[in-house]
Image (cartoon, rainbow, N blue to C red):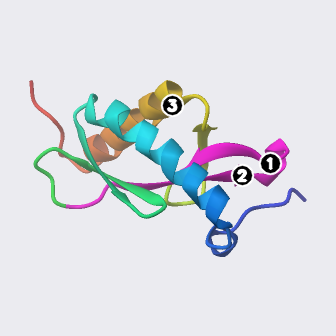
Amino acid sequence: MAATFSNREATRMDEQQRAYAMGRLAALKPKLDARGLVCALNGAQLTVSEVGAGPVLDTITCRPRVTDFGRWWYFDRGGNPINEADDVTGAALTIATNVRKRIGAAGGGRRG
């Protein structure tokens, strides 16, 4: 069975790790903003919403992925890996696509 990195373990990051995670999330924010999403950096989490939409559609974290030799990855609110943290553009594309799918499944969506 593969080892996992729980949300509780994510809160145990030391200050240097937390600063690195916050830096990676800060790098991701403008990439998501450019895709028409509204993001807010709240500590070591990045919340993602659609422009004009109230609810948070996803919460992104950044932490080492145990099953990838401790490399840093972005994770969604369900703890699912998104992309390596070094691939900010790829992560933004994946997150935006997933959020748009959720919006479409809920009957909402952007026009234009």
Q: Which mark is residue 88?
A: 3
Q: Which mark is residue 64?
A: 2
Residue at which label 1 appears: 70
Q: Amino acid at mark 2?
A: Pro
Residue found at x 43% / y 33%: 92
**What residue span does the magenta drawing correspond to?**
55-75
Say whether disc 2 or disc 3 marks the residue closer to the N-terminus. 2
Disc 2 vs disc 1: Cβ atoms closer than 8 Å? yes
- State the SS at label 1: loop
The part of the image, by quadrant, that contains residue 10 is bottom right
Q: Which residue is at a point 80% across and 48% down the rendered structure image?
A: 70
Describe the element under mark 3 as helix, strand or loop.
helix
Q: Nearer the viewer, residue 111 or 61?
A: 61
Query: Of helix, strand and loop, which one carries label 2?
Result: strand
Specify whether 67 is left or right of 48: right
Badge 1, how many Cα within 10 Å: few under 14, some, many 20+?
Answer: few
32 inside magenta stretch: no
> Where does residue 21 sit, x and y in percent of width and height?
57, 52
